[in-house]
Image (spheres, rainbow, N blue to C red):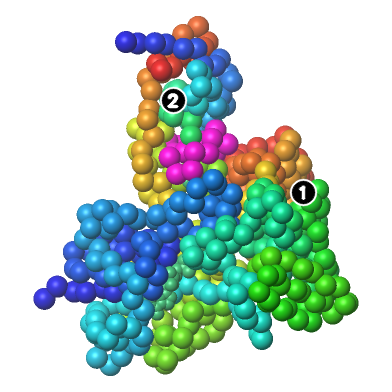
Amino acid sequence: MSRHFVIVGAGEAGARAAMGLREQGFDGDVTLVGGETHLPYERPPLSKDGMVAEVFAAKTIATAERLAEAGVAFRGGVQVAGIDRASKRLAMGDGGALPYDKLLLATGASPRRLAGVEGERIVYLRTIEDAQRLRGVLGAGRHIAIIGGGFIGLELAASARARGAEVTLIEALPRLLSRGVPEAIAGRIAARHLAGGVRLVFGDAIAGIESGAGSATVTLASGMRVEADLVLIGIGAVPNVGLAEAAGLSIDNGIAVDGQLATGDADIFAAGDCASFPLAIYGGRRVRLESWRNAQDHGNLAAHNMLGAGEVGASVPWFWSDQYELTLQIAGLADEGAVTVERELAEGSILFHLSADGRLVAASGIGVGNAVAKDIRLAEMLIGRGARPDLAALGDPGVRLKGLLAA
Amino acid sequence: MADWVEACGTDDVEEEDVIRFDHAGRVFAIYRSPDDEYFATDGLCTHEHVSLADGLVMDEIIECPKHNGRFNYKTGEAKGAPVCVNLRTYRVKVEGGAVFVEV
Ligand SMILES: Cc1cc2nc3c(=O)[nH]c(=O)nc-3n(C[C@H](O)[C@H](O)[C@H](O)COP(=O)(O)OP(=O)(O)OC[C@H]3O[C@@H](n4cnc5c(N)ncnc54)[C@H](O)[C@@H]3O)c2cc1C
Ligand code: FES
């Protein structure tokens, strides 16, 4: 009898895993179950080009034809409601049951909700529907309040300005992007938003948000009030672990998996935004990454290991963000660094982060367009190799990083 | 019909690197391989139309600077997600210290 592999969640990780299984030559059945009605699509454009473009077009990861060609049965608009591990069956939201031999949980993450705040004028940004709702409001003469100075809020601020809307962004901490982005780069991003006409409010807490018929009012602890047509809340995301938790799988800031993405149940794997896993390059530090490339890498790795490859992930975290003409790219986790060296480029700059004993552990770069891309990519390879590059060479833009790879 | 256009000098591209070449409203990428041969492809990534000349060349692979989509620049073949459409390639010849592309 043919084996049946089921993937729950048709996002970046799930879709990649489905295709990856076929690329690896798996000839059993593959079912990809997606809670959303759409074909798998890319989320990053939702806050960027997709928000600014004249006409909204979702960027599909795999078309219906490609899925069909690959022999992947796609079931969209269906939630998986439960996992019966003993009989290896899924309870489907539409009442049916689906047996599996191997299961991949790629359920992603959901926006963190601001407790006690509800209403028509409160939005979050994760899905096509969210993006379309926001698009409908962004435009000249409109005012949007953004709660949270993280990536989603900042990208949306830049897109809203591009569409001519007024923007007030409120961050509870004294600076932007306090999770994972060095202060110098966050400062440069803040300066760009100010120059772009965004009103930035730091160090003030939300006392209340009222969502009325015509507008919403945000009241801050300081007493300041912000009137807006719409309030976007971008205060982070929480992993979708409910299904795994109810099935008794172990949870630790995400579905806890090992370096091969396996849960405690040998037939169940987890990948992408929903999974926490040990990062080999940092001595097994457990992390959960909300990054597009991590979702892809995990999708591939899960496909290999569902087929028994026994492979341990070795990728270096990598993330990018686009705001205005600037692109930020980060390889590795900057908080692993003790020493920082800066390299100035013609149209950007890079901070190299090294451990106390001289190992390159991360690199954060910001520049116009793709000015920092090549060097960040080379840094990523150096990080992956555990290189201990010379500090003076890193800081000298005249020294080609590629040359350091050979060393 | 062969239409050869001078793209750059042979020294304008470093070994195992790439530069951008604009011609008649089109964007090309000109590569120099580690073994000192020259190649040309369309200059924009097939994923989001970003200039590939800002990307990294390793052996016969060009990596897009935006999301690391990979192509073999000798054949134009897309090497996997997020790129699934191949790059068009163009014939190249070297004459008198200059690189010519058949556009
Ligand atoms: C607006 C926005 C901009 C972003 N920009 C960037 C960026 O610039 N750079 C970057 O690196 N990353 C970016 N990201 C992050 C990136 O998109 C995510 O890391 C990536 O989408 C994670 O993929 P995933 O497959 O793990 O999860 P998701 O893409 O969230 O997919 C999970 C899917 O599973 C479904 N699901 C959940 N539970 C069930 C269930 N029980 N049954 C059926 N289906 C279920 C969900 O509905 C969802 O469709 C951005 C994210 C957003 C929202
Ligand atoms: S634009 Fe080239 S990989 Fe996305």
Q: Which quadrant of the view contains residue B85?
A: top left
- In the picture, measured across the screen, residue A337 lies left or right of residue A331, that is right
Q: Is B47 covered by the magenta stretch?
A: yes
Q: Does A314 sit above or below residue A117?
A: above
Number of marks: 2
**Within 10 angstroms of label 1, few (less than 14), some, or many (20 or more) residues?**
some
Q: Residue furthest top?
A: B96
- In the picture, measured across the screen, residue A373 lies left or right of residue A64, that is right
- Specify the segment rendered in magenta: B45-62
Q: Residue at x 83, y 68 (%)?
A: A202
For disc 2, the marked residue is B40
What's the residue type where badge 2 is placed? Ala
The front one of A148 and A285 is A148
For disc 1, the marked residue is A196
Does the image show residue A332? no
Chain at tag 2: B
Does dot 2 land on a helix, a strand or a loop? Answer: strand
Q: Look at the image and tell me in which quarter the N terminus of chain A lies.
A: bottom left
